[in-house]
Image: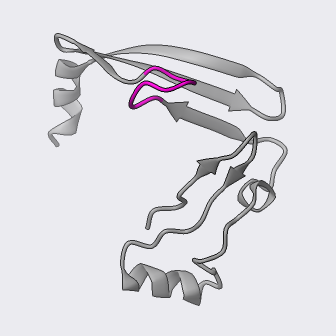
Amino acid sequence: MTACAIKATGGVIQGRLAPTNEEERQKAADAGHDVTKVLTTDELVTSDNCYFAATGITDGDLLRGVRYQGDRVFTQSLVMRSKSGTVRTVEAEHHARKWESYTSR
């Protein structure tokens, strides 16, 4: 099941369960979840010590999208921790040929 279809709206997060088929919809209902309900930030995050991470896929106002150069892949991510107030931007370089050694298993 897709956990949430998340929408950022002016500093809050809203989400809704998004079952991909009838079996997942029934499992959610059996667990007491309403798949039509829009969940608020307080319902999605119940701790004062949580992390949020996002990686740009396409270019946007907040993050750059994925860039390719030869066998290297460049990403930009944002990581935040609520308790400490830490906000980090992570610029990462990934080497695609190294993935083959652990993804082909």
* Residue depicted at 60% across the width and 77% down the height: 36
Across and down, in percent, residue 81 comes to: 74, 31
Image position of 8 with respect to 89: above or below:
below
* Residue depicted at 54% across the width and 17% down the height: 90
Q: Nearer the viewer, residue 31 or 13?
A: 13
Image position of 104 with respect to 99: above or below:
below
Quadrant (top left, top right, bottom left, bottom right) of the N terminus: bottom left
Q: How is the image coloured?
A: one colour
| In magenta stretch: residue 4 | no
Main SS of residues in magenta = loop
**In the picture provided, is 42 more to the left or to the right than 104?**
right
Across and down, in percent, residue 20 comes to: 38, 72
* Residue situated furthest top in the rendering: 69
Q: Quadrant of residue 30?
A: bottom right
Quadrant (top left, top right, bottom left, bottom right) of the C terminus: top left
* Residue depicted at 55% across the width and 24% down the height: 61
* Residue depicted at 68% across the width and 38% down the height: 51
- Look at the image and give the residue range highlighted in magenta: 56-64
| In magenta stretch: residue 58 | yes
Q: Quadrant of residue 94?
A: top left
**In the picture provided, is 47 more to the left or to the right than 102?**
right
Q: Quadrant of residue 37?
A: bottom right
Across and down, in percent, residue 97 comes to: 17, 20
Image position of 77 with respect to 42: above or below:
above
Across and down, in percent, residue 19 comes to: 45, 73
